[in-house]
């Protein structure tokens, strides 16, 4: 699925900056993850901080892994 999202992002490169595309992807992920958190919680007000921490940690872990991959492959 991630590759499909990247394909769409690569189509936008013809008319948009990488920064704008990256911001749109992050916004879409945040919107969908908020929806996901809401659907998993009986009380999102109570669970909000836990959700923020979990999603933030997951994003940081994924970003770090991808940065490490780029460093290894591109030097």
Image: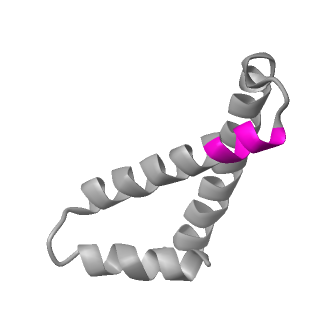
Q: Quadrant of residue 62?
A: bottom right
Q: Position of residue 37 (x, y in %)?
A: 73, 40
The residue located at (51%, 82%) in the rendering is 4
Residue 35 picture location, percent across and down: 64, 44
Residue beneath the point at 52% across and 45% down:
31
Residue 13 visible here: yes
Name of the residue lying farthest toward the top: 46
Q: Main secondary structure of the magenta part?
A: helix
Please tell me whether residue 6 is drawn above or below residue 66 in the rendered image.
Answer: below
The relative height of residue 13 versus residue 66 in the rendered view (above or below) is below
The x and y percentages for residue 28 are: 47, 53
Q: Is residue 72 left or right of residue 75?
A: right
Q: Residue at x 76, y 43 (%)?
A: 39
Q: Nearer the viewer, residue 32 or 18?
A: 32
Magenta stretch in the rendered image: 35-40
Residue occupying the point 54% across, 52% down:
29
Q: Nearer the viewer, residue 44 or 48?
A: 44
């Amino acid at each position: 699925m991630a590759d499909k999202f990247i394909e769409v992002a690569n189509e936008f490169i013809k008319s948009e900056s990488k920064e704008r595309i990256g911001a749109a992807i992050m916004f879409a992920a945040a919107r969908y993850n908020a929806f996901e958190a809401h659907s998993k919680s009986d009380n999102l007000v109570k669970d909000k901080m836990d959700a923020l921490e979990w999603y933030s940690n997951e994003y940081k872990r994924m970003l770090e892994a991808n940065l490490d991959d780029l460093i290894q492959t591109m030097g």
